[in-house]
Image (cartoon, rainbow, N blue to C red):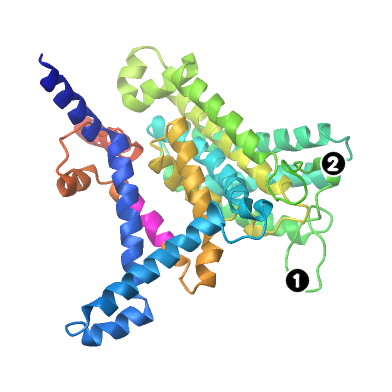
């Protein structure tokens, strides 16, 4: 093969890879968000009335709103060059890390089930269960510092794992679909959590306003601040980074991960090879919920005020997007979690400028839409055909195999 042909083949492999499609999907998502910002801008709409005579006004208004909107996102999530001190200038980055940590942890958990060919929609319910266990330990037990933190984290992991394993057990023994089971458990655990917070004998305190809220966690159970009291960033980000390494080893280097991936690729072949598919379902859901339990500990032990029913912060559903965008692999989920953490950190800065923070939700939805439609990306950019490796594609292929078997 000539040198030219080798370079051509390498370029073709790069362009047909999932990484290229992911980058292009993110770019397109930001372009869709820019279009919505322009379409909702008052100056741009007014300039449309005389666009033929003065087209520069419309173009200037469009460029201005997009640059200001995404500029505010950068200042609120990465670095604020307008800050008076360096400490304040880097605060946005610390907020991105803080808000991205639970998304990374929950994304790892949901990504694990995607690799097994399952679709775990129960991140919210599993996270709430972990928060119940962690909050109980943090508010009702008296232990020395470090030990109290460790026991509370372990309690959160155990609580979430129990719910996840229960879903896996029901699927394995009864054939119930994990999507239905996890969605129903989301509602059950949310209302059960609210019930517990309303009872002062269990987790909550009586409030004059009637708003359910847990007792504040003991000082000995709180995750310590990573950069001092000036920043809200705590050790949750370190837990997330350790979890990324553990997830990578588990799925790529361990025997357990090989069995999980085998069942995800072809459960019939795995069963023929002697793998218990039913036990693998239980194991996968339990391990998935264990990672979500770490996110629960981050939420329950990361702040000194008592948790409320909304403390789950929609992390369970956002983690689905993180896992899909990250391709269910450890490095991808890490980067996707940080990206979505940046969205959360930068949204208030955009709102201050009059740009609706819901634009970022549109950007997120558009990114997932393009990620889930590789043929669309290839058609738009004329990319060479490649193998679909994202989580949605794997689940789709498995469903097609099931249909063919019937």
Q: Secondary structure at mark 2?
A: helix
Residue at mark 2: 220
- Work out whether 341 lies above or below 226: below
Q: Is residue 110 visible?
A: no
Q: Is residue 264 left or right of residue 285?
A: left
How many badges with numbers are in the image? 2
The label on residue 248 is none
Question: Is the C-beta separation of discs 2 and 1 under 8 Å?
Answer: no
Q: Is residue 288 visible?
A: yes
Quarter in which the C terminus is drawn: top left
Q: Is residue 120 left or right of residue 382?
A: right
The label on residue 210 is 1
Quarter in which the N terminus is drawn: top left
Question: Residue sitting at 40 percent across and 31 percent down?
Answer: 115
Residue 254 picture location, percent across and down: 49, 16
Question: Residue sitting at 28 percent across and 38 percent down?
Answer: 20
Q: Which residue is nearer to you in this view: 108 or 25?
A: 25
Main secondary structure found in the magenta portion:
helix
Q: Secondary structure at mark 1?
A: loop
Q: Quadrant of residue 267?
A: top left
Q: Which residues are magenta?
A: 360-367
Question: Residue sitting at 59 percent across and 45 percent down?
Answer: 97
């Amino acid at each position: 093969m000539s040198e030219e042909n080798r370079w051509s083949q390498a370029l073709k492999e790069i362009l047909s890879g999932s990484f290229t499609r992911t980058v292009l999907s993110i770019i397109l998502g930001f372009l869709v968000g820019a279009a919505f910002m322009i379409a909702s801008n008052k100056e741009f709409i007014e300039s449309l009335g005389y666009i033929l005579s003065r087209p520069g006004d419309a173009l200037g208004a469009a460029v201005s709103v997009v640059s200001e909107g995404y500029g505010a996102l950068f200042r609120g999530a990465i670095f604020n060059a307008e800050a008076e001190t360096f400490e304040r200038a880097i605060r946005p980055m610390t907020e991105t890390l803080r808000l991205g940590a639970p998304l990374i942890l929950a994304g790892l958990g949901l990504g694990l089930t995607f690799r097994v060919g399952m679709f775990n929609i129960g991140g919210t319910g599993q996270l709430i269960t972990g928060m119940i266990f962690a909050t109980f330990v943090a508010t009702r037990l008296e232990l020395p510092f470090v030990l109290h933190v460790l026991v509370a984290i372990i309690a959160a992991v155990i609580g979430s794992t129990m719910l996840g394993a229960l879903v896996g057990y029901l699927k394995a023994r009864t054939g119930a679909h994990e999507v239905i089971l996890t969605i129903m458990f989301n509602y059950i655990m949310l209302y059960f959590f609210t019930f517990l917070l309303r009872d002062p004998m269990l987790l909550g305190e009586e409030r004059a306003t009637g708003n359910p809220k847990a007792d504040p966690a003991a000082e000995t159970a709180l995750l310590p601040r990573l950069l001092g009291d000036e920043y809200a960033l705590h050790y949750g980000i370190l837990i997330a980074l350790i979890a990324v390494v553990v997830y990578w080893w588990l799925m790529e280097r361990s025997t357990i991960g090989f069995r999980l991936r085998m069942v995800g690729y072809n459960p019939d072949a795995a069963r023929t090879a002697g793998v218990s598919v039913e036990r693998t379902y239980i194991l996968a859901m339990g391990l998935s919920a264990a990672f979500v339990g770490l996110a629960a500990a981050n939420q329950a032990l990361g702040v000194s005020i008592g948790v409320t029913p909304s403390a789950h912060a929609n992390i369970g559903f956002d983690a689905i997007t993180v896992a899909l965008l990250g391709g269910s692999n450890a490095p991808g989920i890490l980067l996707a979690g940080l990206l979505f953490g940046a969205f959360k950190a930068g949204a208030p800065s955009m709102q201050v400028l009059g740009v609706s923070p819901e634009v970022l939700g549109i950007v997120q939805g558009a990114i997932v839409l393009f990620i889930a439609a590789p043929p669309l990306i290839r058609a738009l950019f004329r990319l060479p055909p490649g193998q679909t490796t994202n989580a949605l594609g794997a689940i789709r292929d498995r469903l097609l195999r099931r249909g063919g078997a019937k």
